[in-house]
């Protein structure tokens, strides 16, 4: 199973917002720290906002923050919301399914069971659990550290 780039970025955004709780963060900060483009990030932030995971504030002093407490953000729910429309294999697709075995294939059922087990495992994980007492993550995502890390890499390289 492969996670889409959108979901990967979404989890990074949520972690960044939790690490920087108590202040509005900017799209530019997140893009720099999470190594992604602001254009792609804008789409992810918009979707997370529509789903209620983020609160966005427009304007000169605007920014992004979590839309609910991190202990209430269940990673399995986030994955389902973002990945639910992506078929695991061709036989799960509503359109473009040309597999002639779809009505008799037992592998399809096994894959479906495995996906459900995958999501069930992620249902045990909250955003708080990913960030709480995670000092290495906090060191990477702390205010001002992303630019410092890049400067240190540039100096070393």
Image (cartoon, rainbow, N blue to C red):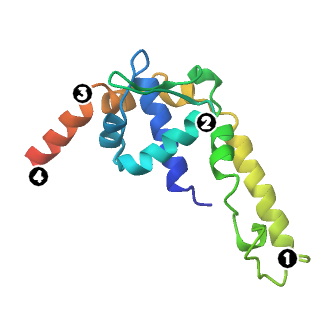
Q: In terms of secondary structure, where does tag 4 sit?
A: loop
CB within 8 Å, label 3 to label 4 = no
Q: Nearer the viewer, residue 150 or 6?
A: 6
Residue 150 in the image: x percent, y percent?
Answer: 19, 42
83 sits left or right of 148 in the view: right
105 sits left or right of 98 in the view: right
Q: Residues within 10 Å of mark 4 (few under 14, many from 20)?
A: few
Q: Nearer the viewer, residue 8 or 31?
A: 31
Could you tell me how far apart the alpha carbons at marks 2 and 3 are, in whole angstroms? Answer: 28 Å
- The residue positioned farthest toward the top in the image shown: 22
Sequence-wise, which precedes: disc 2 or disc 4?
A: 2
Q: Nearer the viewer, mark 2 or mark 4?
A: 2
153 sits left or right of 82 in the view: left
Residue bearing mark 2:
50
Asked if 92 appears above or below 114 in the picture, the reply is: below
Could you tell me how far apart the alpha carbons at marks 3 and 1 are, in whole angstroms? Answer: 52 Å
Sequence-wise, which precedes: disc 1 or disc 2?
A: 2
Instruction: Tell me the quadrant of the picture where the N terminus can be found.
Output: bottom right
30 sits left or right of 126 in the view: left
Residue 105 in the image: x percent, y percent?
Answer: 86, 75
Q: In terms of secondary structure, where does tag 2 sit?
A: helix
Q: Residue at x 69, y 64 (%)?
A: 88
Residue bearing mark 4:
157
Q: In terms of secondary structure, where does tag 1 sit?
A: loop
Residue bearing mark 3:
144
Could you tell me how far apart the alpha carbons at marks 1 and 2 are, in whole angstroms? Answer: 34 Å
Residue bearing mark 1:
102
Residue 66 in the image: x percent, y percent?
Answer: 52, 25
């Amino acid at each position: 199973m492969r996670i889409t780039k959108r979901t990967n970025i979404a989890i990074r955004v949520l972690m960044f917002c939790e690490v920087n709780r108590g202040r509005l963060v900017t799209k530019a900060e997140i893009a720099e720290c999470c190594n992604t483009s602001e254009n792609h990030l804008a789409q992810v932030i918009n979707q997370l906002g529509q789903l209620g995971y983020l609160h966005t504030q427009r304007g000169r002093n605007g920014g992004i923050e979590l839309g609910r407490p991190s202990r209430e953000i269940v990673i399995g729910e986030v994955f389902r919301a973002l990945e639910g429309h992506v078929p695991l294999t061709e036989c799960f697709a509503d359109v473009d399914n040309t597999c002639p075995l779809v009505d008799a294939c037992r592998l399809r059922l096994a894959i479906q069971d495995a996906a459900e087990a995958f999501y069930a495992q992620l249902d045990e994980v909250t955003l708080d659990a990913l960030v709480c007492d995670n000092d290495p993550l906090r060191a990477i995502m702390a205010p001002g550290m992303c630019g410092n890390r890049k400067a240190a890499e540039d100096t070393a390289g």
